[in-house]
Image (tube, helix red, strand yellow):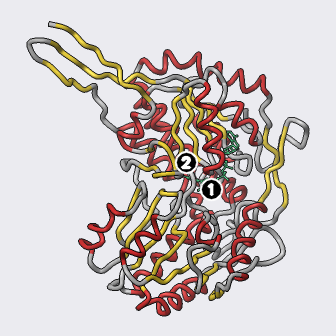
Amino acid sequence: MSVDFEAGVPSASSDTFAVTNPATGQPFAYAPSSSAEHLDAVVQAAHDAFPDWSRDEDFRRSALGKASAALAGAAQQLAVTLSKEQGKPIREAVLEIHTGAHWLNYFAQIEDAPQVIQDDDSAHVEVLRRPLGPVAAITPWNFPIALSLWKIAPALRAGNTVVVKPSPFTPLTTLAMADVLSGVFPPGVLSVITGEDPLGSRLASHPLVRKISFTGSTATGKKVAALAAEDLKRVTLELGGNDAAIVLPDADVSTVAPRLFGSALANNGQICVAVKRTYVHESMYSQMIDALAECARGVVLGAGDAEGTTHGPLNNAMQLDRVSELVDDAVRSGAQVVSGGKRWGTEGYFYEPTILANVSDGTRVVDEEQFGPVMPVIPYRTVDEAIARANASHYGLGSSIWSADVTAAQQLAPRLEAGTTWVNSHTIVTPGQPFGGAKWSGLGVEGGHWGLHSFSEPHVVYTAR
Ligand code: NAD
């Protein structure tokens, strides 16, 4: 199904839903709303395409390489739509498309030979990998292209076919990506269906779907896990986070502050692994607050396509309300707003970059995932205390330790309950890393051989001698 995005067609009807530009708060296009019959037809096509697609690994590798080139070639064009529906600056939208192309290329290149685990007088035992069938890839609105390709690339390489369902807030770029890649993959191998949230559960419970790869909130992830259980579908869940950053007393404030700020405010804080709670040693607390406020003053808010914009709007009205509510609640509990603290402008979903001091655990903005441009900065006395407070969360996605003594920081890292602990950085993910969350932040991982293998199952061939 293809859509003329700029003209905003197909026009509003019961078969479409509106897509809003978060910089204006106004709908600018309509996306197709897949019916139950259309969903059935798409999943059936994925099922029918599976046998041929799963058979020829060289063809798959070559197709992924071509897809990577095609996507990179369309980056500028797709970025315009991505910026308009998601809100991010065009420059970052271009980067996101290239990130997706990089993932496709990585999984085109990765070596994954069968493993011989025994070869002696009694037996030859080899472990093959068998793909699963049609995979449902359900994605959120913060990085619609990159996060869909974190699933598509390994799933296709492993020999599965894929049906993607993007968030109803950002369906257009994923549809446009499918158009760009339509000449690369045989029919049925990669499809995109769009619709509002109930389409996600209909896809996840479709009997021909054999795996659900889901990225989104923890609340929805739990529902997806329950749907998967009914049919024992395989499932990977990449869910919410409330990442703590711990700044040790020896860290250099002027070096660390801009990096911390960038790790918290990139994509307006709408990153699952953004820094969401910052624990700073009491000896440097006031200098750090001042340095972070200075960074906040450098932010230029604006529409993604406006000259000079460093940060766009939040993606949707619900997110703006949530961020406002959490900051207002913190202020009522005694937090000091060092910078920002309110909505910006009257149009669209902009919120000022916000630094909160005199705030602590037990306040909602610290305990919950805020997913917005807000940095609660919390003083601590001892490292043991900071680690205990960082771990006192249902979430366990990312975390970081900032120090002039890299070895000391590396030795503390295993004590943090998280899928990834960065030292002197945060948010950096490469395609070879097993990316995932501890506790309520997820189930399973994406990336590298770990992620690739989550789209297949071991198949042992035991030959007796
Ligand atoms: P969400 O859970 O509301 O929606 C995610 C996707 O699930 C959307 O496509 C939605 O339409 C679909 N969906 C909704 N209800 C469904 C159901 N019952 N069954 C199946 N699908 C359903 O999440 P969101 O608001 O789009 O995204 C923000 C959240 O995603 C944040 O919590 C963020 O931390 C998380 N996230 C996690 C990662 C990660 O890798 N761990 C990455 C990005 C975002």
Marks 1,2: beta carbons within 8 A: yes
From the viewer's perspective, is residue 417 above or below residue 41? Answer: below
310 vs 277, nearest the viewer: 277
Residue for badge 2 = 147
- What is the x, y in percent for residue 374? 62, 74
- Whether 404 is drawn above or below 287: the answer is above
Q: Amino acid at mark 2?
A: Leu
Looking at the image, can residue 8 be seen?
A: no
Locate residue 337 relative to residue 196 in the image: left or right.
left
> What is the secondary structure assignment of the residue under circle 2?
helix
User: CB at mark 1 closer than 8 A to ligand 1?
Assistant: yes
Look at label 1 and name its amino acid: Asn
Determine which residue is flagged by label 1: 142
Which image quadrant is residue 90 in?
bottom right
Point out the image quarter for the C terminus: top left
Mark yes or no: residue 441 visible. Answer: yes
Disc 2 CB within 8 Å of nearest ligand 1 atom: yes
Q: Mark 2 Cα within 10 Å, few/some/many (few <14, many 20+)?
A: many
